[in-house]
Amino acid sequence: MTYDLVLTGGRVLGHGNADVAVHGGRIAAVGPGLAGAVVHDVTGRLVTPGLIDLHTHVGPGYWGIDPDPVAWYTGVTTWVDAGSAGAYTLDGLRRTASQVGVRVPALLNVSAVGLAGRTGESRDLANCDVGLAVDTVLANRDLVRGIKVRIDQETVGANGVEPLRRGLAVAGTCGIPVMVHIGTTPPGLDEVLGLLRPGDIVTHCASGIAAPLGPAVRDAYERGVLFDIGHGSGGFAFEVAEAQLGIGLTPYTISTDLHARSVHGPVFDLPTTIAKLVAVGLPLDDALAAVTVHPARALNLPGGTLDVGVPADIAVFRVEEGRYEVVDAHRQVRHAPLRLINEATYVDGRPLPARLPAPSPPWIPLTDAQRAALTRREQDIRAVLATPLVGADGLAEQFPRPTTRST
């Protein structure tokens, strides 16, 4: 059989050295000697399922970014929007999801207003309407895969863990998990973790602010609460991640919490976040499972593997070995022994086209160094595009002049 597309010669995650064939937008075969109408040689490259980022913000509001420009150079084909939208604003997220080239499943914010602003969405409990949220989930099963609740002092004010209780009530009725954000207290971390069920997700699990390292953390881990990195602007500290790994608390999923404040640093992207976990001792194969098969299982998402029959979401990486500086949310530095450089990203077997990112919104705080770097990047891109692509020897005469006959 001749397939639509074959990637040949790569190291295929979960399959060893093999070719990957795509037909009709799905993985059609994995093995040696496959023939395709289009064949790309990826010898020496790592071929993975399209990466799944379990915690991002791509919906409308304060935090959202356009995923497509970042997806093109990172291999992230599924962007779980973690609570940007609540019941009042989910239609806006649905419109966003319909207009981008990547997959955007959602975690519905328990607060109906979602993340229109920076914080405070659960200070008014009238926004945390259980019945409304249940009705919204049931009407949007194709989009909503879980509930998101942010529990920190700024977000909930005097309401303590009541927004989480309401989120759990919604999730229990609808048979879906809750993802809970942890941060500044009160409410106390032990109280938050004590409410979570097996299969629920605690994001910012290596937060330097929440510092989740006590007995309640171990208890939650052992009863099946899933630990998600959720790096973000303030949710990841190297020393906490190192301490957790040292006592056997391995994150189930690695996510970025990529949003308008973190995309220019300290997060940057998911491959960079993977390198940070490798820097503190997580084996690369474990890190790759945490951005593919594990998040797919956590939210019952398509993809996450390259098994025959699944959607052909694929990423191709060059693995560069060396000593690379990486930084956490608190400007602490470690050195990763490798980095992943994305060379191609496919959704349903189609390569994502290159896209330039939009300028940072005016309300996002940037350092002088970040602003200068963004200006340099814009100038570099302009210079590349303004330079003629090839010279005379790289052109063909598209409309030759008639040959003049001599008389």
Image: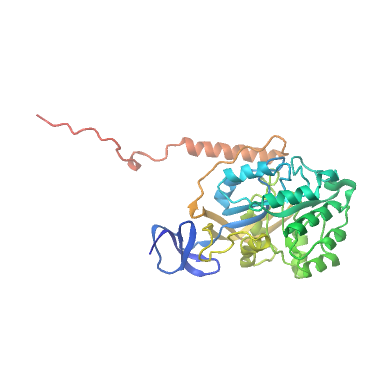
Which image quadrant is residue 402 in? top left
Q: Where is residue 38 shown, x and y percent of the image? A: 40, 56
Between 207 and 390, the one nearer to me in the picture: 207
Q: Is residue 370 visible?
A: yes
Q: As drawn, is 387 to the left or to the right of 215?
A: left
Give the tally of numbered discs. 0
Q: As drawn, is 239 to the left or to the right of 5?
A: right
Q: As drawn, is 22 to the left or to the right of 104?
A: left
Q: Where is residue 118 shown, x and y percent of the image? A: 77, 41
Residue drawn at x 48%, y 37% is 385
Measured along the vertical axis of the image, is residue 202 above or below residue 89?
A: below
Q: As drawn, is 275 to the left or to the right of 349?
A: right
Residue drawn at x 18%, y 34% is 403
Residue drawn at x 74%, y 62% is 227
Measured along the vertical axis of the image, is residue 246 above or below residue 271?
A: below
* Quarter the C terminus occupies: top left
Q: Where is residue 206 shown, x and y percent of the image? A: 76, 59
Q: How is the image coloured?
A: rainbow
Between 69 and 43, the one nearer to me in the picture: 69
Q: Residue furthest right?
A: 158
Which image quadrant is residue 207 in? bottom right
Between 373 and 284, the one nearer to me in the picture: 284
